[in-house]
Amino acid sequence: MDILFLGTGGAWGVPEVNCECLICREMRKRGEKRERTAILLSGETNLLIDCGPDTRSQLLRNRVDRIDGVLISHEHGDHYMGMDELFAYKRNSPKGTWRPVPVYLTPETWEVVSPRFAYLEQMDVIQSHLIEPGKWFTHEEFEVFPFRTEHGAFAKGSVGVAIRSKDRQGREKSLVYTSDFMNLPEVPSEMVGPDYLIIQSFWLNEPMHNRPHHMSFQRAIRFIELLKPKEETFLVHIGDADSVPGDPANRNAKKYEPKDPLRPLSGGDPYPIPLNQEQWQQTVDRIVLDRGLPYKVTVAYDDLCVRI
Ligand SMILES: [Zn+2]
Ligand SMILES: [Zn+2]
């Protein structure tokens, strides 16, 4: 199984349109970007998890020549607005061979997605499959267990997934993908102790008011400790909404003041807010080391491919 991180950014991507904050300026200077978060799992077949507005460039860039299934975690635009791109696979299939792509999502999510994309089903581009939190389903070689996540009132059917599949040696491997969330209403045993964990890290520090119901790295530490991934944790859905000391853009609506910013356990100043990929990884490494966490935590970046 390969895990390809097609995008690792928050809902508006980084750098963001019309933003001159220090994070966006630094990313532009370095030529770095984070497109909307999506991952492609592949082995004999593949499964695309989330399908946002950057899907076209993500699939083109990575020369993805087939999509065998799609899972939509929740109803927010950054997770489904790219579904029209699936049409290209039908258009470019040999005449008479096409089979609709199964799209897995909860009934609540389909209720929001279908007024926009039901025509894809009518034209046999996709076929919707309703999934239920707490119930395993199978997509080709992937065993999938959806679990409920709390992501606010406008994402009622939001789910994460635990997935089992085989590695290159044929051994079973498991992975948990949380998507956007702030809390887990329950922690079913199926999601504890995966080999890999992919978790949202929208801010470094938990903000004073977490109104958008997202996960900060500060809060994610608790979930990493709770879920105990055995091999590696990947951070995704990274934004630019941390306030950076001294940045005039801190007055902008999207910037959040931290509640009690992460700082070394020995005291002293908070960890600096990372402005780019390298700084993100350095900061996360320091925090993991300072706290003696027995976990490998990797800050994912666009087009990172992990071969398992
Ligand atoms: Zn999102
Ligand atoms: Zn969301």
Image: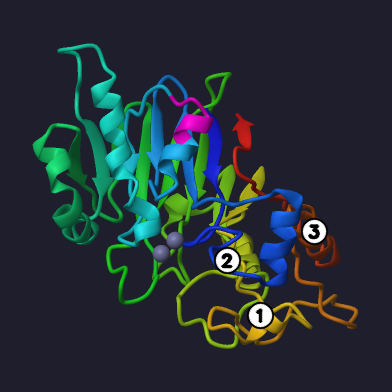
Q: Is residue 221 visible?
A: yes
Residue behind mark 2: 202
Pick the front one: 25 or 197: 25
- Is residue 31 left or right of 49 when viewed as pictured? right
Q: Earlier in the sequence, mark 1 or mark 3?
A: 1
Residue behind mark 3: 279
Relative to 123, residue 277 above or below: below
Q: Position of residue 71 (x, y in %)?
A: 33, 44
Q: Position of residue 204 (x, y in %)?
A: 67, 70
Mark 1 residue type: Ala
Residue segment shown in magenta: 59-64
Mark 2 residue type: Phe
Q: Position of residue 109 (x, y in %)?
A: 24, 58
Spatial CA span between label 2 and label 1: 18 Å
Q: Quadrant of residue 102?
A: top left
- Is residue 175 left or right of 15 when viewed as pictured? left
Quadrant (top left, top right, bottom left, bottom right) of the C terminus: top right
Q: Nearer the viewer, mark 2 or mark 1?
A: 1
Residue at figure coordinates x 80%, y 58% from the top left? 279
Q: Is residue 40 visible?
A: no
Residue at figure coordinates x 9%, y 38% from the top left? 122
Residue behind mark 1: 249
Name, please, the residue furthest toward the left.
122
Residue at figure coordinates x 30%, y 54% from the top left? 134
Local SS, label 1? helix
Q: Earlier in the sequence, mark 3 or mark 2?
A: 2
Local SS, label 2? loop
Report crowding for label 2: few under 14, some 14 to 19, many 20 or more residues within 10 A (C-alpha).
many
Q: Earlier in the sequence, mark 2 or mark 1?
A: 2
Mark 3 residue type: Gln
* Tag 2 near tag 1, CB within 8 Å: no
- Is residue 170 left or right of 258 when viewed as pictured? left
